[in-house]
Image (tube, helix red, strand yellow):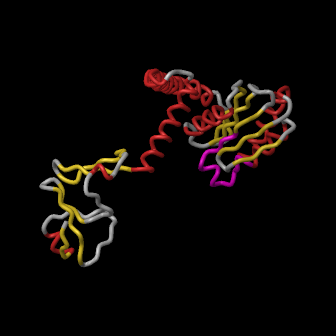
Amino acid sequence: MSIKAYDEAIKNGVVALFGEKYGDQVRVVSTGKFSNELCGGTHVNSTGDIGLLKIIEESALASGVRRIVAVTGSAALELFQNQSDLIFDIQRKFNCNEDELSNRINTLYEDKKSLEKKLKQLNQSDDSEILLWIKESIEVGDHVLVMRNLSIEDPDELKRLGDRVISKIKSGIGVLFNDGNDKPSAVIVVSDNLVKEKINAGTLAKQIGSFMGGGGGGKPHLATAGGRDSSAIKEAMEKTKELIKSSLT
């Protein structure tokens, strides 16, 4: 180790730790031809003084030169314990031995990729059905009303369908009713140009929900409505048709 002026050390190619602040005089620590750096902290006479060590990061400083970051002593012991607890928790969730974990995780990962691929294919195939809904929509002046009664258990899927409907409509409103749960519901979507004309999906949802004995609300472009009795959907659809027509004219 040697003491040098900061500018002289940098000029000689000494590596400074990023983010560290140094004075006019700095300590330069050299290890043979392998390392020549400004002091970044405590030093030891030998690696045996460090005790337990766990490398947590490594990076390139220059061609053929790497830097490692590690935790030592009690911090390393705590890290090992946390990792052990994590592995044990994963074992418990998978209900398997530690040597089976890798295969279980790989299987789960492959299953996830397969499901994502199937979902993507399903979404692409559903576009043809959505285009059919739009083809069968009700024209109100220069706008369209897409209205369907579906049976879907997942309310988020209904919202996704609503988003896809409105993405294919130049100007109009989509109302997707759903009787797939214990209580009736609906998703209302409004095209951007109509939102600018002050047609609010949240306001429509409140009224449509009242047709089913409930209420609703949401954002100007997408909102949801809910009711009490699925048998009310048919009548609610007729009232919704008249409501949308009056809103668009």
Q: Nearer the viewer, residue 35 or 101?
A: 35
Residue at 55%, 39% (x, y): give it: 167
Q: Position of residue 67 (x, y in %)?
A: 26, 51
In the figure, is residue 188 to the left or right of 96?
right
Q: Is residue 176 magenta?
A: no
In the figure, is residue 146 to the left or right of 6?
right
Magenta residue span? 188-202
Task: Tell me the quarter of the picture where residue 164 sits.
Answer: top right
The answer to whether residue 62 shows anywhere in this view is yes
Q: Nearer the viewer, residue 191 or 179?
A: 179
Q: Nearer the viewer, residue 173 or 22?
A: 22
Residue at 44%, 22% (x, y): give it: 99
The answer to whether residue 105 is above or below residue 219 is above
In the figure, is residue 49 to the left or right of 226?
left
Q: Position of residue 179 (x, y in %)?
A: 76, 26
Q: Position of residue 54 (x, y in %)?
A: 36, 44
Q: Position of residue 171 (x, y in %)?
A: 60, 43
Could you tell me how many numbered marks the image carries? 0
Task: Tell me the quarter of the picture where residue 246 sits.
Answer: top right
